[in-house]
């Protein structure tokens, strides 16, 4: 899966939450393939020597590491989302598709940090406070603060944050993209 993310050919994912007793779908999220980064892939241990596919290595997808904007609701509490709204939310992330996996990963990780603040307004200092976390996700980058500023500019250009000046930012309405 990590290789697929790096090559840019990871699949779109659909995450389904359902009621087993009633055989009813409750929630369905679409995660576009270009919203997957290496920070949301967790390598599992290889299968043991007695397994039929001995040595095979799988992965877990860490949904918590995928920003809420990339968890596009298709079905919420059993109600189908308007198709136009699903397309709008999908298109909002479309600029990520053309980026290389490492640049896309930085953008998604900074977006996840921004959304994790749960603030309508935030400062550059708020993001810098999470510098160690971002450095841990991108250990080969020795210029984390400039990279954070660059990614905030990308997020601004995508309309995911608004720059207010003087190191201050505002988070526009998420419009229902906040997943449970």
Image (tube, rainbow, N blue to C red):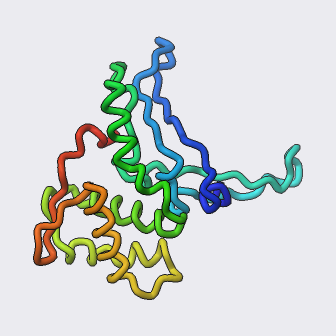
The spot of residue 38 in percent (x, y) is 55, 62
Front-lying residue, 121 or 46: 121
- How many numbered discs? 0
Q: Is residue 130 above or below residue 85?
A: below
Query: Looking at the image, which residue sits at the far bottom?
Result: 142
Q: Quadrant of the N terminus?
A: bottom right
Residue 118, picture quadrant: bottom left
The spot of residue 103 in percent (x, y) is 47, 69
Residue 134, picture quadrant: bottom left
Residue at image coords 46%, 15%: 24
The spot of residue 87 in percent (x, y) is 37, 35
Residue at image coords 49%, 75%: 138
Q: Quadrant of the C terminus?
A: top left
Q: Is residue 11 above or below residue 3?
A: above
Residue 153, picture quadrant: bottom left
Front-lying residue, 127 or 132: 127
Query: Looking at the image, which residue sits at the far top?
Result: 22
The spot of residue 4 in percent (x, y) is 65, 55
Residue at image coords 30%, 57%: 158
Residue 112 vs residue 168: left or right? right
Q: Is residue 105 above or below residue 18?
A: below
Residue 165 vs residue 8: left or right? left
Residue at image coords 37%, 53%: 67
Front-lying residue, 29 or 21: 29
């Amino acid at each position: 899966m990590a290789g697929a993310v790096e090559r840019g050919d990871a699949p779109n994912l659909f995450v389904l939450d359902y009621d087993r007793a009633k055989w009813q779908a409750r929630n369905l999220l679409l995660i576009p393939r270009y919203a997957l980064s290496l920070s949301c892939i967790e390598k599992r241990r290889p299968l043991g020597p007695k397994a039929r596919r001995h040595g095979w290595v799988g992965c877990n997808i860490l949904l918590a590491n995928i920003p809420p904007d990339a968890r596009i609701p298709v079905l919420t509490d059993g109600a189908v989302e308007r198709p136009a709204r699903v397309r709008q939310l999908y298109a909002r992330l479309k600029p990520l598709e053309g980026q290389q996996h490492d640049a896309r990963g930085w953008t998604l990780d900074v977006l996840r940090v921004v959304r994790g603040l749960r603030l309508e307004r935030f400062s550059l200092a708020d993001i810098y406070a999470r510098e160690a976390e971002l450095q841990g996700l991108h250990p080969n980058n020795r210029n984390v603060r400039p990279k954070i500023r660059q990614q905030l500019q990308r997020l601004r250009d995508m309309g995911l944050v608004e720059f207010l000046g003087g190191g201050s930012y505002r988070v526009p309405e998420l419009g229902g993209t906040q997943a449970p």
